Image (tube, rainbow, N blue to C red):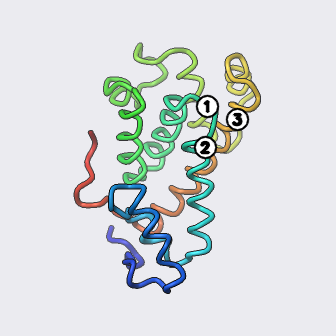
Amino acid sequence: MAARVPYLKREDLAEADREIFDNLAAERGGVVGNIYRTLAHTPNLLRRFLRLGGELRNKTALDPKLRELAIVTVGRLTDAQYEYVHHWNLARRVGIRREQLDALADWEKSPEFSDNERAVIRYAVEATNTVKVRDATWNALTAFLDTRRLMELVQNVAYYNMVVRILVPVGVELESDTTRQ
């Protein structure tokens, strides 16, 4: 499906909003991704979206491997290719092995995952598919995550569930040069 709204360019933004793209380009090697080009139709919300996403991605105590396993699970379950591919690549950069990512569809039985990783994936699956999380799932997380890290996991899964609910209905497409690494 093609995007349902146009991707904006820097010149399409009001002068006062162009710094959003300038900052994104500076942070991301000159590239402003399609998700941001879509969300730029609402620049004030995009600013807040970026702030929260940056905080969740860069300023939490949660192990980045656990975070990315949860996020890529959300992308896989919702068939949000944009999120799935981008976070597949982020997962690889933080040290998740390709074999683990390839085994995500069989995460419950695959020997590629530790019990803690399975607990995180199970949480992401339940929170994404049914919103309600079983006590056994929650308790498995509390066995190895303190309250801060647990809440960081909860907020990452919630945030990226919001993201896929933007990406999929709007039809945000992968950038032409973006592939799984």
Q: Earlier in the sequence, mark 3 or mark 1?
A: 1
Helix, strand or loop at mark 1: loop
Percent of width and height locating residue 138: 72, 27
Disc nearest the viewer among 3 and 1:
1
What residue is rendered at 68% in x and 26% in y?
Answer: 137
Left or right? Give the position of 50 relative to 98: right
Q: Amino acid at mark 2?
A: Asn
Residue holding disc 1: 62
Residue 133, numbered circle: 3
Disc nearest the viewer among 2 and 1:
1
Location of residue 13 with respect to 109 vertically, above or below: below
Helix, strand or loop at mark 2: helix
Nearest the eye: 18 or 170: 18
Marks 3/1: CA distance?
Answer: 19 Å
Disc nearest the viewer among 2 and 3:
2
Marks 2/1: CA distance?
Answer: 10 Å
Quadrant of the image occupied by residue 145: top right
Q: Are marks 2 and 1 in contact (CB under 8 Å)?
A: yes
Percent of width and height locating residue 60: 63, 37
Sort mark 2 into few (<14), some (14-19) or many (20+) by Cα contacts within 10 Å.
many
Marks 2/3: CA distance?
Answer: 15 Å
Q: Amino acid at mark 3?
A: Val
